[in-house]
Structure formats: C-alpha cells, structure tokens
Amino acid sequence: MTINLTRRLMLTGAMGSSIAGAAACVSSVGAVKPAVAEAAFPPKAGIDPYLLGPKEGVALLSRNENPYGPSKSALDMIEYAATKGAFYTSRDAQVKLVEMIAEKNGVAPEQVVVTTGSGEVLSAIALIYGPKGPIVAPRLFWDTTALYAVNLGLAEIQRVPLAADMSIDLPAIEAAVTDQTGLVQLCNPNNPTGLVSDAATLQAAVKRMAAKTTVLVDEAYIELSDDPAANSCVPLINAGHDVIVTRTFSKIYGMAGVRVGYSISSAETAEKIRATAMSWSPSLSIAAAIGCYNDEKFLAMSRSKIQEAREMVNATVDTLGLTRLPSQTNFVYFKSGQEANDVQQAMAEKKISIRGQYMDYNEWTRVSMGKIADVERFCKALPEVLRA
Ligand SMILES: Cc1ncc(COP(=O)(O)O)c(C=O)c1O
C-alpha cells in the first residue's frame, strides 16, 4: 500500500501540471513533488497515511469504487485547483463542466445539474417528488437517497418484487404506477444485482410510465454496460418524456471521494432540482471532472481493468458451481449458499472487505472489483471461506 501511494504521488508530481499558466502555482504545492513524496506523505506528523482510502493491507471490495482513478487528467486539474483553493468555485468552471456534459449527451446546458456526487442530486429529486406520492422502485435498488427522504418523513417507497431472474420486473412496476405515484425510480444497471434491463423493453416501459409520473433512471454504472449509448434513457428526455437521468464520476471515472455527479432532465425539471440541491461542488471536484470527462484513453483502461477483474470473479464463482448474475458493472452479485454476513465476516478476517446481506437476500453476496491483486486475493479466499 505504501508503495502504491508513493507511486501515485510520484507519478502525479512527476507529471506536474499540464495546465497552461499554472506552472508558477504548481511549485507552491511542492509537497507533492517527487523528490519529497516519501517525506511529504503523510502530510503532517501524526496523520495516518491510511486516513483516506483502504486501510493498510485491506482489499477494499465493498463499495463499488474504482481504484484506477483518478486519472492523470483529473489529478493535474486537482493540483491546479488546489492552488486556487482560496476562491469559491467559479461560475465559469461550473458552466464549463455543464457545457461539456451537455455536448456529450446532445442536450442543452440548461438541462444539466451538477452536484456533489450523484447522491446529492438523487437526494434533491427524492425531496421534490417524495411528497407527491410513493416512490415506486424495484425491491432491490440503490435506495440510500430515497431513504433520506423517507427518514425526513417526506417520502414512502413502494417496493416491487424482482422478477424470477432477479431483473427489474418492469411490467409489475408499470402496473404499480398510478396518477398518485410521486416518482418511479429505476437503476440501470441495477445495484446490487449488476443487471442491465433490456434497452427496448426498458425504454418502452419508461415512456408509458412517464405519461403518468416522473421517471428517474439512475445510470451510475451505465458507462460500464456493454452498450452505454443503447442502454441510456437520455434520448427519451429530448423526445419530451418526463424522465430524469443521473450519472456519476464515482464509478468509471474512479473519483468516488472527489464527489461529482449530475442529472439530465428537461430544463424545467433541472430548475427545480437546482433550487433543491443543498450545496455547490468544490472547485477541486469540478476541475477534476473537467479534466477527465472526455479522457477516452483513461475510460477505456478503466473499463478493461474492471472487465478483467469481473472475469476473474465470474470464473471463480463458476468453478465453485455457484449461481451468479451476469453483471455489466464493477461488482458481481452471487449466491454463495451461505449467510452473506458470515461470508463477509470470514473475508474481513482475511482483510478483504465485501458487502454483507441486502434485505432478506441472506445467501447473496456482492463483491466489488478493485486492483487485480486485490481481486486475486478474493478469488483465492472464496473457496477457503465457503469450505470452512
Ligand atoms: C446506483 C448508484 N447510484 C448512485 C450512487 C451514488 O454515487 P455518488 O454519490 O458517489 O455519485 C451509487 C453509489 O454507490 C450507486 O450505486
């Protein structure tokens, strides 16, 4: 771990900043220059070098992060932005990122809202639509932000059982939607199942449901799916359907700790979301997102490393004869046949962090992809843990 951290710092420092005009400022953040990288980390005596990121020796495979990020393009911009940390995030920087997102998705800048992780925009959406009526959602989905509104007494979640193959049961969701529904919340690909809904079926169902209520499609992992363009519901927005899509820089971009996410919707809905979001993103985060948003080389590398890790996990699970879902994300959900919390505990004893039980899916385990060496540790440990 120390080696990795040091390497990362040395790389960052060695690359310096590619930002024109930033060179003078870069020297003022000399703490990350290669010559002093070892001594500079931890930055102050008494600060644990593992304060951020995985603890020493731990394979962190529980939170769907992507340890291949941030990219060099993002790190360069963070380094630059750090030197401007005295100043509030500039409107120009926010506009720049919004324009980049709008351009890539074929929408107008007014339709894009950038927030501190997609968690913030999803929370804002839950606050807007929760009071209107139940949030109809599949039984298993990333429910943190809907629960945020529930906990405030502002929403209620109406969970619809999954289909037999654990995919989102779209006909059943559609049947549950009425004029009283506050919001339909779908996650494509879904978390924790990792499953992508069939594009044509999903889009047809979303269109019909959006005639009755607002439909939110959380596309946090869409870039990791086999065909992101075909799977995305963004085109439905410009076709005039009442649809909101959210995305994040936490997954394929590997910036979960940097905290940038966004929504795409009609301009009118975007205005409501903007008014409800509670904060504005740090300049370091906006700068990082600008740096890497169109870094296709990094994205391809990230995708291929995640796929490589996923194939390793799939092969291990298959060799053990266990059932798994065909994931198009950076995590795999499989049925170990043993209590998920016991499997989690046994892995923790080997310093491998994975997810415990979801709802009453007590024999299902979710493991996230990570650095290949960490995933290898999981693959080696799994038969030992299940045999014990
Ligand atoms: C489906 C889904 N949506 C959204 C999020 C929130 O991500 P963030 O707030 O980091 O953008 C997560 C986090 O794991 C997730 O799994």
Image (spheres, rainbow, N blue to C red):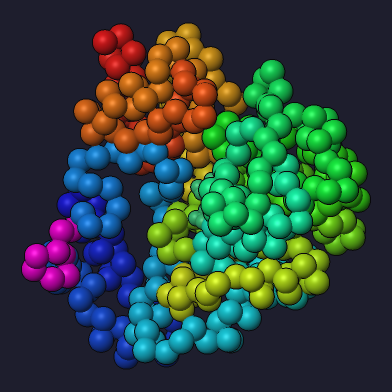
Asked whether 16 or 229 is in front, the reply is 229
Q: Identify the residue at horizontal 44%, vertical 56% (top origin).
A: 256
Rendering coords of residue 205 (x, y %): 85, 39
Rendering coords of residue 14 (x, y %): 28, 70
Up the image or down, 107 lies above or below 323; here it is below
Up the image or down, 25 lies above or below 278; here it is below
- Residue 30 lies in the magenta stretch: no
Asked whether 130 or 5 is in front, the reply is 130
Drawn side of residue 349 relative to residue 125, left or right: left
Q: Is residue 19 visible?
A: yes
Rendering coords of residue 115 (x, y %): 57, 68
Q: Identify the residue at horizontal 66%, vertical 73% (top origin).
A: 274
Which quarter of the image is occupied by the C terminus?
Answer: top left
Asked whether 223 or 147 is in front, the reply is 147
Up the image or down, 202 lies above or below 108; here it is above
Rendering coords of residue 171 (x, y %): 83, 30
Magenta-colored segment: predominant secondary structure: loop
Considering every residue shown, the one lying at the far left of the view is 45
The boundaries of the magenta stretch are: 42-49
Q: Is residue 328 visible?
A: no
Specify the quadrant of the image occupied by residue 214.
bottom right
Drawn side of residue 253 relative to residue 170, left or right: left
Considering every residue shown, the one lying at the far front of the view is 153
Up the image or down, 247 lies above or below 135; here it is below
Drawn side of residue 276 relative to residue 360, left or right: right
Q: Identify the residue at horizontal 24%, vertical 64% (top origin).
A: 10
Q: Identify the residue at horizontal 37%, vertical 33% (top origin).
A: 354
Tell how many labels: 0
- Residue 46 lies in the magenta stretch: yes
Asked whether 14 or 310 is in front, the reply is 310
